[in-house]
Amino acid sequence: MAEEWHIKKRRPVRKKAIVPLLKELESSLGIDLAVDGAFIEMAMYGPWEMVFLDKTPIAVQIQNDEHKKYAFLTLRGFLANLDAQKWVEVDHGAIPFLMNGADCMVAGVHSADSEINEGDLVWIRDMEHKRPLAIGWAVTSGLEMPEATKGKGIKTIHWVGDELWNME
């Protein structure tokens, strides 16, 4: 997937042009991005519209299957905001699979934010260090995910091994 994508049309943007996207992101994840004084850029990355703060890819705007747009942090964005909501914690057995881009199975999920609904964008973190591993679409709710024993919990769309993670 990501091997074919390249950053295109990278351009600086004014803060007032991107405030609605950032406010939506801050309210949905319960964070403060503190963008005052930051150099803000936007670019296209495949089908995603990406936001850079001080040359770091911090957020993306993604469409779901029904073509509704959602704003969400990249993995680098989550590294700077480890207290963000919409998290799912997995055990060490799931990490090698997630690092190769596999979907997250519920057997590896130990806990999840109870506010997650089916179809939400979520971020996956390891249960010991709380570091981001991947983002994806929740297939089940945050209450059901840790209790389930088999099946898919999250459809992964961006992971640690992805090209975007290594971008500077």
Image (cartoon, rainbow, N blue to C red):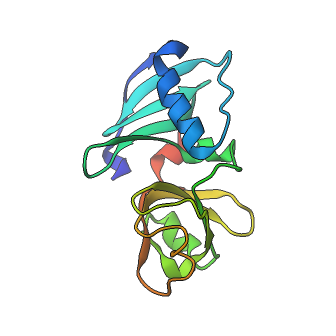
The picture places residue 139, in percent across and down from the top left corner, at 40, 67
**Residue drawn at the location 38% of the way across and 42% of the way down:** 62
Horizontal arrangement in the rendering, residue 57 relative to residue 83 (left or right) = left
Residue drawn where x is 44% and y is 33% of the image: 50
- How many marks on residues? 0
Q: Is residue 13 visible?
A: no
**Nearer to me, 158 or 18:** 18
**Above or below, comparing residue 163 to residue 167 in the picture:** below
User: Does any portion of residue 52 appear in the rendered image?
Assistant: yes
Q: Residue 129 placed where, x, y %?
A: 74, 63
Q: Position of residue 17 (x, y in %)?
A: 46, 16
| Image quadrant in which you'd find residue 6 | top left
Q: Is residue 14 above or below residue 155?
A: above
Q: Is residue 45 above or below residue 78?
A: above
Judge by depth and name the residue closer to the eye, 104 or 121: 121
Q: Position of residue 66 (x, y in %)?
A: 25, 49
Q: Residue furthest left?
A: 66
Q: Quadrant of the C terminus?
A: top right
Q: Quadrant of residue 95?
A: bottom right
Q: Is residue 4 left or right of residue 19?
A: left
User: Above or below — where is 57 with respect to 78?
Assistant: above
Which residue is located at x 41 percent, y 75 percent? 152
Q: Residue at x 68, y 44 (%)?
A: 81
